[in-house]
Every structure is written in structure tokens, then in C-alpha cells.
Image (spheres, helix red, strand yellow):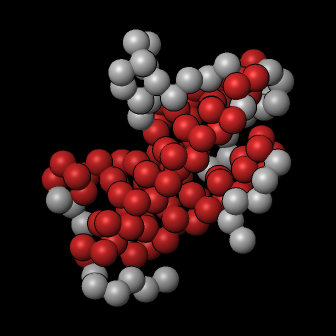
Amino acid sequence: MAFEGGVNNRRLATISSVHAVEMFLYGLFEQRDDLGISAFVDKGDQTLGPRDALAVLQRRLQEEGLLAANRKLSHRDQLSALVGHRDMVIHRASEVSEEELARGMKAVERFIRKYGDDLMQIELLQ
């Protein structure tokens, strides 16, 4: 996967990919109110970060029996790594290699496809 414009475009793609996961999770929490998950921290004035949102979703799915207690959400580790790259881009202007970005973007796509279909019964990515 080649990205025109080099390092800056990879940085933006990293930030955008994490943002896509966050928006997906917040939409899922809103649409599946039966799961009882809020996208907001306690007082409702701040949203959960992507890692916290993934942890809350995983815990809730385990409680509901939709995910085995000893299992993680699919692609959670890869998404967490992508969040780490995003944080380094934002706070330290770090570079992201094409390989790291490609792995992260593939995990984002697979995560959204799986949970869009499994939990929302809609195909989000065509």
C-alpha cells in the first residue's frame, strides 16, 4: 500500500484511522442501547478514548455472553498499536512506516466489518 506525499500523509492517515474507530464505537454504543454502554466518561463531558471504549465494549460483550470470558475483541491488539502510533504522531511528530500504517488500517477495516455485521447487522464497508 503506497501513500502519496510520504510521511505527512501517513501521519494523517493514522490519525484518521483511529478517529474512524472512535466514531464507529460511539455510533455502536448509541445504536445498541441494549448493551448499556455510553461513549462518555462519568459526568458526560468527555468521551472515552479509543482504548477505553474498546475495553468497555469487550467487557460488556463478555458479560452478555456474546464474547467468551477468556477472549479479546477481534483486532483489539492491532487497534491498540495503531492508537499508540497516533499518539506518537500527535505528541512527538513521530513517523509511521507504510507497513505499520497498512497493518493498522487493515485492522480498522476488519474490526468495523466484523462488529458492524455482528452487532449492528449492517454492512458498513463495501
Residue 91: % across, % down: 18, 48
Horizontal side of 60 relative to 67 (left or right) equals left
- Residue name at image x 43 percent, y 86 percent: 2
* Snapshot quadrant of residue 101: bottom left
Residue sticking out furthest to the left: 92
Residue 72 visible, this angle: no
Asked if 26 appears above or below 93 in the picture, the reply is above
Q: Which one is in front, 78 or 90?
A: 90
Asked if 107 appears above or below 36 in the picture, the reply is below
Q: How many marks?
A: 0
Residue 85: % across, % down: 34, 54
Residue 26: % across, % down: 55, 38
Residue 8: % across, % down: 24, 73
Horizontal side of 42 relative to 78 (left or right) equals left
* Snapshot quadrant of residue 48: top left
* Snapshot quadrant of residue 59: top right
- Residue name at image x 38 percent, y 67 percent: 13
- Residue name at image x 52 percent, y 65 percent: 105
Q: Quadrant of the C terminus?
A: bottom right
